[in-house]
Image (cartoon, coloured by chain):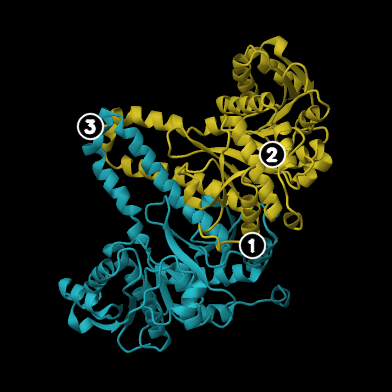
Chain colours: A yellow, B cyan
Amino acid sequence: MAERLVISIDAMGGDNAPDAIIEGVKIASDKNPEVFFLLFGDEDEISRLARQNQLNEKCYKIYHTDQVVKPDEKPSAAVRYGRESSMWKAIFAVRTGEASAVVSAGNTGALMAMSKICLGTMAGVDRPAIAAIMPTQKPNKDVIALDLGANAECNATNLVEFAIMGSVFRRIVYGEKRPTVALLNIGSEETKGREEIKQAAAILKRNKDKVNYVGFAEGHDIGTGHTDVIVSDGFSGNVALKSIEGTAHMVKNMIKTYAKKSVLAWLAVPLILPTYLRLKKRVDPRRYNGAMFLGLNGISVKSHGGADAMGYSFAVESAINLVRNDLCEKIRIDLEDIIFSDEDAQL
Amino acid sequence: MAERLVISIDAMGGDNAPDAIIEGVKIASDKNPEVFFLLFGDEDEISRLARQNQLNEKCYKIYHTDQVVKPDEKPSAAVRYGRESSMWKAIFAVRTGEASAVVSAGNTGALMAMSKICLGTMAGVDRPAIAAIMPTQKPNKDVIALDLGANAECNATNLVEFAIMGSVFRRIVYGEKRPTVALLNIGSEETKGREEIKQAAAILKRNKDKVNYVGFAEGHDIGTGHTDVIVSDGFSGNVALKSIEGTAHMVKNMIKTYAKKSVLAWLAVPLILPTYLRLKKRVDPRRYNGAMFLGLNGISVKSHGGADAMGYSFAVESAINLVRNDLCEKIRIDLEDIIFSDEDAQL
């Protein structure tokens, strides 16, 4: 790790780049003045925005890049032809050790592919996973879910690795000693679901001292907050995540549509506004911004492409927090520590 | 089909059986006086409830059974040892032609397994699927989703069959000529997702005159109402369904929790009540009760286990509607009609 905590920023990735990115860095920098930022992208634009936002000159350095990875670019093409891009250069700074983590709001698939190639997969990890923090109905309780889309298909070993990585991630972010971990399935009985899930459950049960495995969870359990970590293959996880986001959005739109037709409902606005604002703050997507690629030799954080400055600053702070808590090293120790029986090793 | 429209009822399945079942039959019978019901279960209890609910004596017949399939019974065990149960006997009445459809609020897995064995799978269908109707944010638009849990793993042919069956189901329920059909995936680009989904997309594209295939949908698209039918394997579909139900529940609980703390919000209740009631009616789970097993030689409808009388009556009416519109015959014709190219046949 660099002596001063250094975060590498892909300043050109995301719908609102580079404006929201630099503004977001400013917010994060004000809260964490000891952190140094490497800003990759168009030098002229970034300098202008840095001055405009009064970013402390002692806290950043700009590296000029001409190329930008497009939002719809295929990951394979980005990896092959994007070596001069702000995204690649920003990740590369983590590889060389100049920075301790990278944050990008650009193309998710490209960021994943580039991070994987550039940083490499951790020893003992077959496949890295995307993890994110989501709100639950319990007032002060979030849930960590993974994989959210990196691996459309997974075997039992992948799922067990995700369980370990998710558990460590949870410990670091929330300081809980033995976070509860569940496997996403389509029923709570042991006989239900796909073969790889049942195998993963068997392995996790044999390693309860390492991972606090509590059984299967179903789609509706994600939001109850009964479990700290929920593990799935990337396809199901992505479907669940987007179904949840879509439903929250749908409910909001439905309430709007129905309320619009009622004068009485309009009269109620001043009365329900404080409640609405508190609830809105609790589920503010910006607070939950910053998905992690777990299982790489380095910290790579994906900000939502549409994030505003405040949202982006949360992703940056999440990266800072993980560096401070030495995420990669802790995952490495836990992975080595888990006892795969001979039976498990054959999976 | 029997001369008079006959519906077979598993009167002992479900959390509130037989009370809510017989009360639900009464509601459906009042609206459809020409329908005759076969009621399978405890004769004494059913007679008492039928009298109590003033069920028209000319509209039903009771068949006594002693055995009940338990909610947590394994499907394989239910099939083997449950041949004297109300569930099996009710399904068997469809097989013999005494009834045209069966409705049960009992154990889903057992109902699926028993229906499959007892009624048989339609020629041309490899795997039956569970389909259900779900609300969307568009005021008068629902979406049909399948498979919701019958098949944890599916190949391309299965998905294509689901697309055809879902399309016919939609036509019958909503009278739309060319309902739009999408495949659930984790991205909208053609290169995304699992191999079987890409293969299914290719087959559906070649058969656009038969199925109005419109491309991939993601989890958040289920609730927008942009597509009439959404097709997935049973695992992802089940995860999506439960994530959506869970989120709706979560949002409701969160609003309650936050509103409880505010006196102002309580004062607003009379003003927002009419809007709340309209919205509640629109998304009333009872209105969406009645999942269909598609692809069998007969109509088998699953009511939610926790349904009340009103909810159960919707499941019964859904069965009546499908019999009247000759669902099975129409699916059979469409399946025969679709052109599987030689290439497709090899899948």
The amino acid type found where label 2 is placed reads Leu
Circles 3 and 1, Cβ within 8 Å, touching? The answer is no
Find residue B13 and report its horizontal and vertical position in percent: 35, 70
Residue marked by disc 1: A195
Residue A29 lies in quadrant: top right
How far is the residue under mark 3 from the one under mark 2?
A: 48 Å
> Does residue B219 appear in this view?
yes
The amino acid type found where label 1 is placed reads Glu
How far is the residue under mark 1 from the one under mark 2?
A: 24 Å
Q: Chain of mark 1?
A: A
Left or right placement of residue A112 versus residue A138 in this view: right
> Does residue B208 appear in this view?
no
Residue marked by disc 2: A294
**Which mark is nearer the camera, 3 or 2?**
2
Q: Earlier in the sequence, mark 1 or mark 2?
A: 1
Badges 1 and 2, same chain: yes
Residue marked by disc 3: B267
- As displayed, is residue A97 above or below residue A36? below
Of residue A18 and residue A7, the one placed in the foreground of this image is: A7
How far is the residue under mark 3 from the one under mark 1?
A: 53 Å
Task: Check residue A107 in the rendering and tell me which mark sits there, or answer none.
Answer: none
Give the residue displayed 66% in from the left and 45% down from the top: A162
The amino acid type found where label 3 is placed reads Leu
- Bin the neighbour count of mark 1 within 10 Å (Cα to Cα): few under 14, some 14-19, many 20 and up: some
Q: Chain of mark 2?
A: A
